[in-house]
Amino acid sequence: MKNKNDNLKRVIVDFKKLTPEILALLVEKYPDGYDDDQIISFRNQHNEIIEAVEVTTEDTKYLVKVSTKLAVTMENYDEDDYEDFDGDDPDAVQDPEIIDEDSDDDNDL
């Protein structure tokens, strides 16, 4: 017997291509963020190791590449931020401001 997920289109999504629709699916599936055991690791066509989390729609399985930007964006998600955008607009999801706690703004030498 065939699994219904066998016929799904598979799409790898980088943060730059993340849409409000996929972001909403991620936040719905992982409301408290994702854990290490939910991350899928695989090799791409360049033999690079890719780490991603999975969300599925009726016809597509999305593997969204894991990154600090993704984690911060999911943590700060508010659907009202995207109400003026189409659900499939990759320009709607902007890079979050990530504060580097290791940086030192003192220029004292």
Image (cartoon, rainbow, N blue to C red):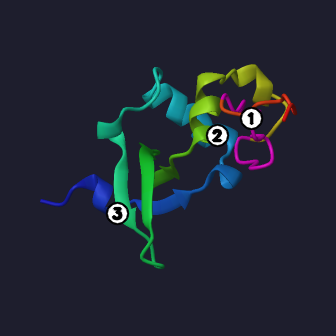
Q: State yes or no: residue 27 in magenta.
A: no
Lower sequence index among marks 2 and 3: 3
Say whether residue 58 is visible.
no
Q: Distance between the residues labelled 2 and 3?
A: 30 Å
Q: Tag 1, which secondary structure?
A: loop
Q: Which region is colored magenta?
A: 87-101
Q: Distance between the residues labelled 1 and 3?
A: 34 Å
Measured from the top left, where is residue 44 in percent x and y? 44, 71
Q: Tag 2, which secondary structure?
A: helix
Comparing 92 with 45, the one in front is: 45
Q: Nearer the viewer, mark 2 or mark 3?
A: 2
Residue drawn at (48%, 79%) of the image: 46
- Residue 86: image quadrant is top right
Residue 69 marker: 2
Residue drawn at (45%, 70%) of the image: 48
Residue occupied by mark 3 = 7
Residue occupied by mark 1 = 96
Q: State yes or no: residue 91 in magenta.
A: yes
Where does the N terminus fall, quadrant-wise?
A: bottom left
Q: What residue type is labelled 1?
A: Pro
Residue drawn at (42%, 32%) of the image: 34
Measured from the top left, where is residue 109 in percent x and y? 84, 35
> Pointers 1 and 2 in contact (CB under 8 A)?
yes
Q: In the displayed structure, would residue 24 be above or below residue 78?
A: below
What is the count of numbered marks? Answer: 3
Q: How far apart are marks 1 and 2 (CA)?
A: 6 Å
* Circle 2 Cα neighbour tier, 10 Å, few/some/many (<14 / 14–19 / ≥20): some
- Residue 98: image quadrant is top right
Please give left or right for residue 104 compared with residue 101 in the image.
Answer: right
Q: Which amino acid does label 3 sit on?
A: Asn
Q: What residue type is labelled 2?
A: Lys
Lower sequence index among marks 1 and 3: 3
